Image (spheres, grey):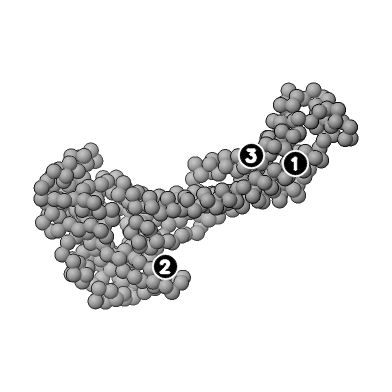
Amino acid sequence: MAIPLSYIARNLWTRRLTTALTASGLALVVFVFATVLMLDAGLKKTLVSTGEEDNVVVIRKGAETEVQSAIDRAQANVIEMHPAVAMGSDGRRMASKESVVLISLLKLSTGKPSNVVIRGVSPAGMSLRPQVKLASGRMFSPGSSEIIVGSGVAKSFSGTQPGEHLHFAQRDWTVVGTFDAGGSGFDSEIWGDVDQLMQSFRRTSYSSMVVRLAQSDQFDGFKQDLDVDPRLADEAKREQTFYSDQSKALSTFINILGFTLSTIFSIAAMIGAMITMYASVANRVAEIGTLRALGFRRSNVLAAFLVEAMLLGFVGGMAGLGCAAFMQFASFSTTNFQTFADLSFRFILTPAIVVKTLAFSMTMGLVGGFLPAMRAARMSIVDALRAR
């Protein structure tokens, strides 16, 4: 015979003040825990959504980022003419030879410089990224000193609105438009004509190539051909895999920092839950004796107090999740450890994060309530009834 759940819940409601205070402490820990998971999910979604399933990024072997890579023009031509590369509607190969450089711009929020990615793209560059749409202004003209700016850069850096000018690489560049990349990593970049950017930065090699495969299942053959071709020293990665790898260092840092803070705070929260449950046991000695006298076993009393502690954790978890949900309206900007460039992304709350967070909060309640529940279960009927 189990003690009814309604009876257990009423005990929490009877002690509303202590329940609210303890739940608030648990909610703070849950808020930190959930926002860390949301931040990591937002980072991964931003970078993974940067890539298209049938796109392949080609960089120099051994290079971890496009900034570190170099592909000379002869190699680029060989890659572009590979039979696996798709043909566009205009009869041209769907390949973009790209140059990636970091420049320093002033952030509007701090007035301090931060690195921004400048990407030189070929005419096929836009068609290879269907998620990139012009939000205002127009596309840059090939062969000109014109650039378009990602929405994340336009919101965060000075001199990046249409009609304004940026000076870098010994040349003035005119911002002619802004683009929205659907929350992907391209929102944190500035795009221009690859040949003009390479000329200005005095570069003779491309940083990378992006190609569209005619068929997705041709990737393994395409990759193998590049590996064995003596003219090439390059490797191919699916675009989604390439950008996912870019998130690993920053994701690891966010998780270590967040879970360290969560662990420290959770210890204090569990101690608070333990104190609350010990006080509950002390105030309900006679009640525990009555339950035992009515035929409830020690295991029933133990289970009732553990469920009560878990309900306390659940209340705190829901409160913390409610506060964390509002973080979805905020964006976060930091330096990507892989590229050393500024990267903007959002907090994202997913069903998996909700489940993990509630499980974490109820576990805190369970751990904090275990010893008080054991104390309640070990009380003898006679001693408990004498306390009346």
- From the image, tell me which residue sits under label 2: 156
Separation (CA) of disc 1 from disc 2: 51 Å
78 and 227: which one is in front?
A: 227
Identify the residue at image location x=22%, y=41%.
Answer: 219
Mark number for residue 278?
A: 1
237 horizontally vs 348: left or right: left
Q: Amino acid at mark 2?
A: Ser
* Residue 297 seen in render: yes
Separation (CA) of disc 3 from disc 2: 44 Å
CB-based contact (under 8 Å), mark 1 and mark 2: no
CB-based contact (under 8 Å), mark 3 and mark 1: no
Q: Amino acid at mark 3?
A: Val
- From the image, tell me which residue sits under label 3: 367
283 horizontally vs 177: left or right: right
Q: Amino acid at mark 1?
A: Tyr
| Percent coordinates x, y for residue 246 in the rendering | 34, 52
Separation (CA) of disc 3 from disc 1: 13 Å
Q: Quadrant of residue 301?
A: top right
